[in-house]
Image: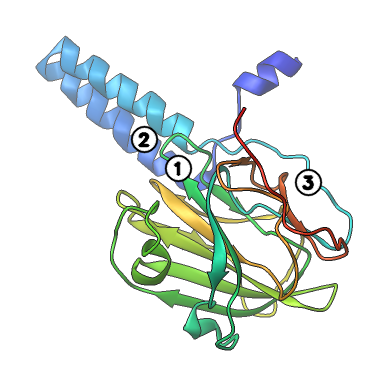
Amino acid sequence: MDMLRSVLVPIHRAGWKFIAGFAVVSLLLFLLAAWLGWIGVVATLWCIYFFRDPPRVVPVRRGLIVSPADGMVQLIEPAVPPPELEMGSDALTRISIFLNIFDVHVNRVPADGSVVKLAYRPGKFFNAALDKASTDNERQAVRLRLDEGPEIAFVQIAGLVARRIVCELKPEQRVMAGERFGLIRFGSRCDVYLPDGVAPLVAVGQRAVGGETVLADIRNPEPARSAEER
C-alpha cells in the first residue's frame, strides 16, 4: 500500500485542464501518425508529473521557517524586499530557490502567521536562475506577520518558461506552515526574506523540499552555516 501511494501521487486541481488538453491533442496526433501520437502521450505523462502534489511532513515547532518550494538553493544574499510590500529599504537575508521543470511546483506557506499584504507586479520572463529575476521578472509577493512577532516576505517569481503565477492567499488570512497556497507554471523561483538578524540554516547548492526543509529558526542563535560538496 505504501509503495502504491508513492506512485499514485495526487494531482493539483489546477493541472487537470492541462492534462485533458494534452490528452486530446495526443488523440488528434494519433489520427495523423502513430509516432506523433506517442510523442503526445509522453507530453501528457510529463504534464501529469509536473502537476503532482505529494503530501509533506511539516515541522510544526514555533519559530521555524520552512521552504515554500522544492528546488535548488540558488542564492543567499542581502537584498531589499520588493518595494510593493512596503517593508522598508533595509536589506534582509534573501534565500532564492530555483525550481526546474521537473520539480514539484505546488508552493507552501513558510511559517505560521497572518497575511499582511499581497502584491502582484507584472514583469519580464528572464531565466529564473539569474539574479536579476528577483527584480525584473513577473512576481507575486506576500508579506507575512509571524506568530512569533517579526515579519517575513516570500515571493513567487515567473521564469523563462513560466507564464502563470497562481496565489490563493487573501489579505488578513490566517495561515499555517506547510499549507498549500499556489503554484507557478512551468519552471520558476521562490524567494524568502528572513527577519533581520535571523541566519539561514541552508547553504547554496542544497536541495530544498517544500514544506519540509527548515530554512531558518527564529529561536535559534546559530550563525549561518557553511557547506561543501562531497
Instruction: Check disc 3 and report the residue beneath it.
Output: 58
Report helix, strand or loop for mark 1.
helix
The kind of residue tagged 3 is Val
Residue 6 image position (x, y, % from top left): 66, 22
Q: Is residue 3 left or right of residue 90?
A: right
Decide which of tag 3 and tag 2 comes sooner along the chain: 2
The answer to which quarter of the image holds residue 46 is top left
Residue 45 located left or right of residue 197: left
Q: Is residue 89 left or right of residue 173?
A: left
Residue beneath label 2, please? 20
- Give the side of residue 111 with respect to residue 229, left or right: right
State how far apart marks 3 and 2 are (Cα): 31 Å
Amino acid type at circle 1 is: Gly
What amino acid type is highlighted by mark number 2? Ala
Q: Which residue is mark 1?
A: 15
Question: Image quarter for residue 87?
Answer: bottom right
- The residue nearer to you, when weighing 23 against 164, is 164
Q: Residue 57: horizontal and vertical position, in percent?
A: 78, 40
